[in-house]
Image: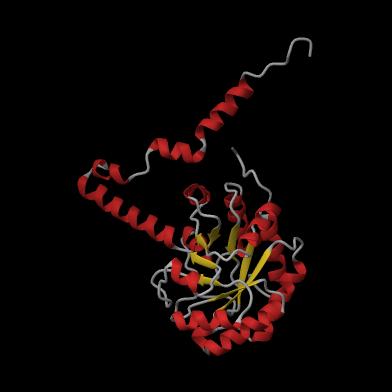
Amino acid sequence: MLHTRTTPAERRRALRGRLEEDRLLMMPGALNPLSVRLIQDTGFEAAYLSGAVLAADLGLPDIGLTTSTEIAARAQQTTRATDLPVLIDADTGFGEPMNAARTVQLMEDAGLAGLHLEDQVNPKRCGHLDGKSVVAREEMTRRIRAAVDARRDPGFLLMARTDARAIEGLDAAIDRAKAYVDAGADAIFPEALANEREFEAFRAAVDVPLLANMTEFGKSRLLDARTLQNLGYDIALYPVTLLRLAMGAVEDGLRTLAAEGTQESLLPRMQTRSRLYELLGYADYSAFDSAVHDFTLPPGA
């Protein structure tokens, strides 16, 4: 009740320990603190906070308009509500290497288990859109080095994302990934790979944990968990899936309400009041409140 039962250090150790297992980690993206509770309740072992989702929640496109402090504040609200390790999208680090260093410490303070930094030019674009640009490899290695030097908890996972595949080609993206590992990145996120052959080539070339981004409507084919496991990937990311499901349901509901003048036909598709209260731990709050209200000092105290 009120907060997670685990410490950030425990959740960071849990994520690193999980990545040492020869078993794919499926990581859905949360919408908000309530949805991360549902991710945990459904049995997933980690959660994600997407920069695109956090921007969309503010009514903004994913083009670098959010700030590090906005993202850290939302992250803290989310990590408070779950015992799962949470990985966050930290875009480009929100500026120069010094900004990336500050971003790492903000995200550590927010209770996250790790973050990823990307090699796009700041301000960035969605990784599955055309027209994005990447910084020079040397500039990105300085970004990573600043993040590594700023990290206070060695358990905090620093992942490097490269968007170079769509711009410079697969071989250049692999070379960048190797340089990022040499600069101190713990894991690699190769964005917008085209097919299974490219996923396989990355796995053969890079000897750290790899993340496969299974975002919908993007440049990568949606591969199932068994295929990604067989390809040797460590994390399967579903960053915007829940947002798209939720917003699709909201749109359908609004159209139905406008057309029918009542929500009656929508009731079977809704989460019930009792299920919401169960997810929130409503009974635990009531019991806590009653215990405090009824508390009295023992005689003679």
**Residue placed most toward the observer, 239 or 75:** 239
Q: Is 173 drawn above or below residue 93 in the view shown?
A: below
**Residue placed most toward the observer, 297 or 180:** 180
Residue 130 visible to an observer of this rendering? no
Q: Position of residue 242 (x, y in %)?
A: 43, 58
Residue at (55, 81) in percent of width and height: 202
Residue 262: quarter of image: top left
Q: Position of residue 196 (x, y in %)?
A: 45, 80
Q: Is 74 drawn above or below residue 51 in the view shown?
A: above
Q: Position of residue 236 (x, y in %)?
A: 50, 66
How many numbered discs sit on the rendered protein?
Answer: 0
Residue 23 visible to an observer of this rendering? yes
Residue at (46, 61) in percent of width and height: 59
Residue at (58, 48) in percent of width and height: 82
Residue at (39, 37) in percent of width and height: 273
- Identify the image quadrant of the N terminus: top right
Q: How has the structure been colored for display?
A: secondary structure
Residue 275: quarter of image: top left
Q: Is residue 263 left or right of residue 299?
A: left
Residue 251: quarter of image: bottom left
Q: Is residue 192 left or right of residue 78?
A: left
Q: Is 33 drawn above or below residue 299 in the view shown?
A: below
